[in-house]
Image: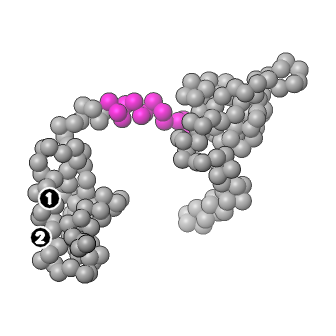
Amino acid sequence: MKIHPKHIIESLIFISLEPLSLDKIKSVLTEFSDKEIEGAMKDLLENYTSNEKGIQIIQAAGGYLFSTNPEHDLWIKRLLKFERKYRLSSAGLEILSTIAYHQPITLAEISALRGVDSIHSLKTLLQKKLVKIVGRKKSPGKPLIYRTTDKFLAYFELDSIKDLPSQEEILKILEEEKNLD
């Protein structure tokens, strides 16, 4: 099976985090002549210029990148508005990490670890089904006990709670970031 430069270019544009210039494409596709690459790029652009596709390739900032079809903006905005509902505040993330690393845990324990009241953000996490109540602690007042859910694992793309980074890994990452500053 012959590999076509057009398909490779499409993959490169798809995976690139910034607009991909023709020069950069040529530097990666050393097995093909400039003429082959330019022809493949022309074919690729022609394939994506019809309004029959949901995505298109556009030229921006000196390179090429994928963009959505402007005719679909209404639905894209709806999706993004829907997804925004699931963004977490810094307090929410802090509570979620506290629960993840210390579960099972009570509200009082969460608030004590954070040094601030956590009820509001905890309610939000419960509504988003990222945490759940798993019972009551056998202590005075019988406070509710919280754990993370499978939705939490999916949200952070984890297979299990064991996949969370260890304290040592976190410290190493923070130290590396500190050294970059």
Residue at 63%, 59% (x, y): give it: 174
Label drawn at residue 129 = none
- Percent across and percent down for residue 115 are 74, 35
Residue 62 percent coordinates (x, y): 21, 63
Would residue 11 be seen by someone viewing this image from the given angle?
yes
Q: Give the image location of residue 50, x and y in percent.
A: 11, 48
Q: Residue placed at 48% from the left, 33% from the top? A: 86
**Which SS class for mark 2?**
helix
From the viewer's perspective, is 118 left or right of 127?
Answer: right
Identity of the residue furthest to the top in this view: 141
Residue at 13% across / 44% down in the picture? Answer: 51
Q: Quadrant of residue 9?
A: bottom left
What amino acid does circle 1 point to?
Leu
Q: Label 1, on which residue?
A: 45
Expressed as whole percent of the image width and height from the top left, the position of residue 16 reads 33, 61
User: Looking at the image, which residue is at 64% across and 47% down?
Assistant: 160
Q: Main secondary structure of the magenta part?
A: helix
Query: On the rendered image, what quadrant is the N terminus found in?
Result: bottom left
Tell me: 29 left or right of 125.
Answer: left
**In terms of depth relative to the viewer, which is nearer, 9 or 85?**
9
The alpha-carbon separation of the residues under discs 1 and 2 comes to 10 Å
Identify the image quadrant of the C terminus: bottom right
The kind of residue tagged 2 is Gly
Task: Say if the magenta span includes residue 58.
Answer: no
Q: Quick one: label 1 or label 2, which is nearer the N terminus?
A: 2
Which circle marks residue 39 in the picture? 2
Mark 1: secondary structure:
helix
